[in-house]
Image (tube, grey):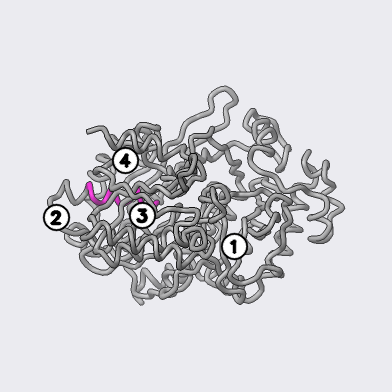
């Protein structure tokens, strides 16, 4: 380990220790987090309404404080956006992360307090670096530049509170000296026009020796392909010989993994983080496994609602010590950003209880269950991966939706898939996809048996850049915008079908 890495190890050592404490004392840390958050917010309007100062146990908390969706909590957030102080967290909140999500619905504005920014978002990033250094003591990432993609930041003029993508808020509030570690600089990072910004980022990054990447896989891939096109190089290591790691989050990496393998030149390390506007939740702490260690001492108290029966509709949550292996849970958060028993919309599945590690399995609103088949994103990605590997295909983007029964016609699933490399045999791709989806989802298998309820899936092979053009048409290029993978109606598939016909 060289001098620079020894210094980095000294600086990040406390965060490595905190990760180990999370592995060893998870339940105790969660209890301390809950009591600390309640005490801090006890004098706020929300804290007084639900008697935070009288809550001394998780059972008290669960019985007193309701689980809420964004729509239910939005009136409180809007008051804070208008400049009111002490609504659900002490003081006036100046920043709000604009979470565009994956739908056409109005944007969400998630409060970002000093405590959540410093104690959660930045701390999660420091833990990520500490973990990577521990696993790769000879890394060069502290001697080279990190290529980042940030969103745009705008000012909510009327009330003098600011909003923007979470990444933009983080860049805006970082010390000035971090610009020396990252490319592009903050001026370029905070540009609003994605297509202008794309060229500006590439021009800046191509002048630097980049060793690490951080960002959302889909938009980072667009940028990297643009850099290859701009330089005429055949792979990334011809541009940046010291490139070694991609820290990625925001969406599942599974559909993009092969794309990155194709363009990297030499093997890259891939480390996943699980973060959102609401918080930095988990990180991949093992080199050879993609499971994510929940960060249980960074200001977030976690609860989980089993995705079975009517538990979600009844909003019956359990603390971390009561979760079980292999089950899907909706995630509920209470944070130092002032969110209280907030239903974030993600679902996770526990793959380890010692320590607590999860995989992100989907979204509470993004699934296909028009016929009782309960297809989640994890199912779809597994089946698409199997079909791609068997037919030599590489997928760029995809989305799926139901085809509803009409008259005597049976239902089906309809998929729009854009390929980087199309399958050698399209019929075989469809067959394997259908069979593997049945293998990983017994409810789908039952509905497909003898075409009893569902006919074989309909797969459209999208024209080049269809999803990019669709996201552009919707004003959702770059930043943290995501392509919706599944929908239980035809809200997304219909405009994609129409746009796919246009040249």
Determine the secondary structure under disc 3: loop
Asked if the residue under mark 2 is in contact with the one under mark 3, i.e. CB atoms within 8 Å, the reply is no
Q: Magenta segment, principal secondary structure?
A: helix
Judge left or right: residue 39 versus residue 283: right
User: Front-most of 46 and 329?
Assistant: 329
Residue 482 lies, with reference to residue 375, above or below; the image says above
Mark-to-mark CA distance, 1 and 4: 31 Å
Question: Residue 205, position in %: x, y?
Answer: 26, 49
Q: Which residue is labeled 1 in the image?
A: 328
User: Front-most of 381 and 93?
Assistant: 381
Q: Earlier in the sequence, mark 4 or mark 2?
A: 2
Q: Earlier in the sequence, mark 1 or mark 2?
A: 2
Quadrant of image for the N terminus: bottom left
Residue 155 forms part of the magenta stretch: no
Mark-to-mark CA distance, 3 and 4: 30 Å
User: Front-most of 183 and 235?
Assistant: 235
Mark-to-mark CA distance, 4 and 2: 23 Å
Q: Which residue is labeled 2 in the image?
A: 233
Mark-to-mark CA distance, 3 and 1: 39 Å
At a point 22% along the width and 46% down the height, the residue shown is 226
Residue 468 circle label: 4
């Amino acid at each position: 380990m060289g001098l620079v890495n020894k210094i980095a190890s000294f600086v990040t050592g406390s965060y490595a220790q905190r990760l180990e404490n999370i592995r060893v004392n998870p339940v105790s840390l969660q209890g301390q987090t809950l009591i600390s958050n309640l005490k801090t917010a006890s004098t706020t309007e929300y804290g007084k309404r639900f008697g935070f100062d009288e809550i001394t146990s998780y059972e008290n908390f669960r019985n007193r404080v309701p689980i809420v969706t964004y729509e239910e909590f939005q009136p409180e957030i809007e008051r804070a956006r208008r400049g009111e102080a002490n609504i659900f967290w002490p003081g006036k909140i100046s920043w709000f992360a604009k979470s565009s999500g994956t739908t056409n619905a109005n944007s969400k504005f998630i409060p970002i307090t000093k405590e959540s920014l410093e104690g959660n978002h930045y701390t999660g990033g420091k833990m990520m670096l500490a973990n990577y250094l521990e696993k790769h003591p000879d890394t060069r990432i502290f001697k080279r530049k990190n290529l980042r993609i940030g969103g745009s930041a705008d000012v909510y003029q009327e009330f003098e509170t600011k909003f923007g993508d979470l990444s933009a808020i983080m860049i805006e509030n970082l010390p000035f000296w971090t610009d020396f570690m990252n490319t592009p600089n903050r001026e370029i990072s905070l540009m609003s026009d994605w297509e202008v910004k794309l060229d500006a980022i590439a021009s800046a990054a191509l002048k630097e020796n980049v060793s690490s990447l951080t960002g959302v896989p889909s938009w980072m891939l667009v940028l990297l392909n643009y850099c290859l096109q701009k330089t005429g190089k055949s792979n990334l290591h011809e541009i940046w010989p010291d490139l070694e790691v991609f820290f990625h989050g925001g969406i599942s990496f599974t559909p993009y993994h092969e794309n990155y393998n194709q363009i990297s030149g030499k093997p890259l390390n891939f480390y996943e983080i699980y973060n959102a506007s609401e918080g930095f939740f988990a990180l991949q702490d093992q080199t050879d496994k993609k499971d994510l260690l929940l960060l249980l001492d960074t200001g977030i108290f976690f609860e989980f609602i089993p995705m079975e029966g009517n538990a979600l509709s009844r909003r019956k949550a359990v603390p971390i010590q009561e979760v079980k292996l292999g089950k899907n849970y909706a995630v509920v958060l209470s944070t130092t950003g002032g969110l209280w028993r907030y239903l974030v919309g993600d679902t996770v599945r526990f793959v380890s209880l010692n320590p607590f590690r999860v995989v992100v399995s989907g979204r509470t609103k993004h699934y296909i269950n028009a016929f009782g088949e309960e297809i989640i994103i994890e199912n779809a990605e597994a089946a698409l991966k199997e079909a791609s590997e068997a037919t030599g295909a590489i997928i760029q983007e995809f989305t799926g939706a139901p085809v509803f029964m009409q008259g005597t016609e049976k239902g089906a699933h309809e998929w729009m898939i854009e390929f980087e490399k199309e399958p050698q045999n399209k019929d075989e791709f469809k067959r394997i996809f259908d069979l593997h989806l049945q293998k990983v989802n017994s409810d789908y298998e039952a509905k497909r048996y003898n075409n009893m309820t569902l006919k074989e899936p309909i797969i459209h092979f999208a024209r080049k850049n269809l999803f990019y053009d669709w996201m552009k048409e919707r004003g959702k290029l770059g930043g943290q915008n995501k392509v919706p993978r599944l929908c239980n109606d035809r809200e997304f598939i219909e405009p994609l079908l129409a746009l796919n016909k246009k040249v």
